[in-house]
Image (cartoon, grey):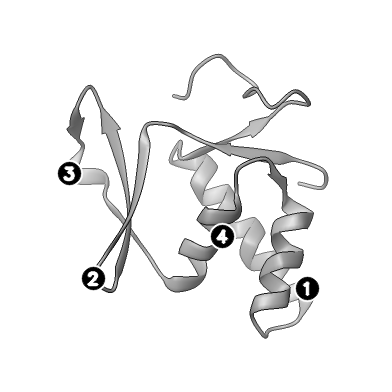
Amino acid sequence: MAGKTYCKNPDMVYRKIADELILVPVRKQSADLNAIYLLNETAGFIWELIDQRSFEEIARIVNGAYDGGLETIQDDVRFFLEQLVQIGAVQEAIADGRTSSTAFK
């Protein structure tokens, strides 16, 4: 994960509604109601940091904002980014900022 930079899938919408942080995949003008993700405060903070930042940058910023020790925070950020990649919410970016493939899955 070292040196990897991530970008968000433009088909994922992130909203703060009251005290809830949600991530919703939107496809063809309709939301997939079976895939609405509720994020905790830390996950929402990480989501807001993702675009064109590396894993190391994200972990460093999170470490400055939260207590927990750098190693634990790196593990948590790594786990969350892996989950986001798995659901298609983010993708690894290549050097010029494009995604590694032409479209998100």
Query: For mark 2, does the 10 Å Cα neighbourhood hold few (<14), some (14 to 19), or many (20 or more) residues?
Result: few
The residue indicated by pointer 2 is 18
At label 2, which amino acid type do we have? Ala
State yes or no: discs 4 and 2 in contact (Cβ < 8 Å): no
The residue indicated by pointer 4 is 46
Image spot of residue 86 (x, y percent): 49, 41
At label 1, which amino acid type do we have? Glu
Image spot of residue 30 (x, y percent): 17, 31
Which numbered tag is attached to residue 33? 3
Q: Earlier in the sequence, mark 1 or mark 4?
A: 4
Rounded to the nearest whole Å, what is the CA distance between mark 4 and mark 3? Answer: 23 Å
Q: Earlier in the sequence, mark 1 or mark 2?
A: 2
Location of residue 32 with respect to 105 vertically, above or below: below
Q: Earlier in the sequence, mark 4 or mark 2?
A: 2
User: Marks 1 and 4: which is nearer the front?
Assistant: 4
As helix, strand or loop, the secondary structure at mark 4 comes to: helix
State yes or no: discs 3 and 1 in contact (Cβ < 8 Å): no
> How many callouts does the rendering have?
4
State yes or no: discs 4 and 3 in contact (Cβ < 8 Å): no
Q: Earlier in the sequence, mark 2 or mark 3?
A: 2
At label 4, which amino acid type do we have? Ile
At label 3, which amino acid type do we have? Leu
Picture quarter containing residue 31? top left
Residue drawn 58% across the image and 49% down it:
82
Rounded to the nearest whole Å, what is the CA distance between mark 3 and mark 1? Answer: 35 Å
Which numbered tag is attached to residue 84? none
Q: Earlier in the sequence, mark 4 or mark 3?
A: 3
Image spot of residue 72 (x, y percent): 71, 75
As helix, strand or loop, the secondary structure at mark 3 comes to: helix
